[in-house]
Image: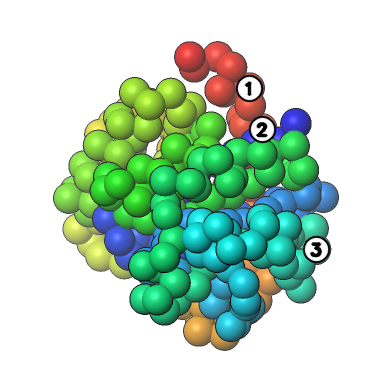
């Protein structure tokens, strides 16, 4: 039986989508069968990061009741990784019912080792429906106090909702001398630090090319950090859920 993991954050722009894409491919490289889902219904970017453009139909069509979920599962060019994309136009956003997300996503658990859900930022209703489609959670934050505290609040809500929060990723660390250090971030977040992803120009370069950095520049520091994250997720997923609650 697989793991449903919501990738969440308190603020936009922290790197949720980049993390979802790279973690998916890193887990695929480890021989795991992966499904990545773009559940950010208004700011869909996962398919662009993973190199799939203009996919039709998408999860929006499923949430509008127009197609079945199997019709929107696309095989990517990455080993063992499938993708459910989202649409990027407002017409699709208007017709999709985000309240259907948990019912659509949860049955996919038995078909994959890991289902990774790229969620909207914050605690609005569309974000909550996406996050509660998972059973475990990974929080993504940047090393700034406002971002850390906002993401910590998301973690509190997810715990109260019954998700096992595996921990958090400190992303883009080292871009400023004022960055909150990992130890201090972990103290504020009150969940384990899973990985520190350094500020790495190769990550931005890879994103512009539509190729996640673990594939684009596997020897880069950013890629190595995402591979370590994958190893940690494999180690604690499921087990942590059983012992936490």
- Between disc 3 and disc 2, whose residue precedes? 3
- Residue 171 position in % (x across, y down): 40, 56
Residue 150 seen anywhere in this rendered image of the structure: yes
Which residue was labeled with disc 3?
79
Task: Please name whichever residue, 1 or 90, is drawn nearer the observer in this view of the structure.
Answer: 90
- Between disc 1 and disc 3, whose residue precedes? 3
Which quarter of the picture shows residue 198?
bottom left
- Residue 70 position in % (x across, y down): 73, 57
- Residue 176 position in % (x across, y down): 25, 65
Residue 194 seen anywhere in this rendered image of the structure: no
Which residue was labeled with disc 2?
235
CA–CA distance between discs 2 and 1? 8 Å
Badge 2 crowding class, 10 Å Cα cut-off, few under 14, some 14 to 19, many 20 or more, is few
What residue is drawn where x is 34% and y is 35%?
Answer: 155
What residue is drawn where x is 44% and y is 76%?
Answer: 88
Element at badge 2?
helix
Which dot, 3 or 2, sits closer to the camera?
3
- Residue 240 position in % (x across, y down): 57, 23
Badge 3 crowding class, 10 Å Cα cut-off, few under 14, some 14 to 19, many 20 or more, is some
Which residue was labeled with disc 1?
239
- Residue 48's mark? none
Q: Is label 2 in contact with label 1 (beta carbons under 8 Å)? A: yes
Element at badge 3?
loop
Task: Please name whichever residue, 194 or 112, is drawn nearer the observer in this view of the structure.
Answer: 112
Which quarter of the picture shows residue 91?
bottom left
Badge 1 crowding class, 10 Å Cα cut-off, few under 14, some 14 to 19, many 20 or more, is few
Drawn side of residue 17 relative to residue 185, left or right: right
């Amino acid at each position: 039986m697989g793991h449903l993991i919501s990738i969440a954050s308190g603020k936009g722009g922290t790197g949720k989508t980049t993390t979802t894409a790279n973690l998916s491919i890193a887990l695929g490289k480890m021989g795991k069968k992966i499904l990545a889902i773009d559940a950010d219904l208004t700011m869909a970017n996962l398919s662009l990061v993973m190199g799939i453009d203009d996919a039709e139909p998408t999860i929006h069509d499923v949430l509008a009741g127009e197609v079945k979920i199997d019709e929107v599962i696309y095989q990517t060019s990455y080993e063992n990784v499938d993708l459910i994309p989202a649409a990027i136009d407002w017409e699709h956003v208007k017709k999709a019912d985000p309240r259907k997300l948990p019912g659509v996503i949860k049955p996919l658990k038995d078909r994959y080792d890991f289902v990774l859900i790229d969620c909207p930022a914050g605690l609005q209703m569309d974000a909550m429906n996406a996050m509660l489609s998972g059973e475990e959670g990974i929080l993504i934050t940047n090393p700034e106090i406002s971002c850390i505290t906002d993401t910590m609040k998301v973690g509190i809500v997810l715990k109260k909702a019954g998700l096992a929060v595996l921990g958090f990723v400190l992303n883009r660390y080292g871009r400023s001398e004022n960055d909150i250090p990992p130890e201090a971030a972990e103290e504020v977040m009150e969940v384990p630090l899973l990985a520190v992803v350094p500020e790495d120009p190769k990550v931005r370069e890879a994103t512009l090319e539509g190729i996640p950095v673990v594939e684009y520049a596997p020897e880069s520091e950013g890629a190595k950090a995402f591979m370590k994250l994958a190893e940690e997720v494999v180690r604690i997923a499921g087990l942590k859920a059983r012992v936490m609650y």
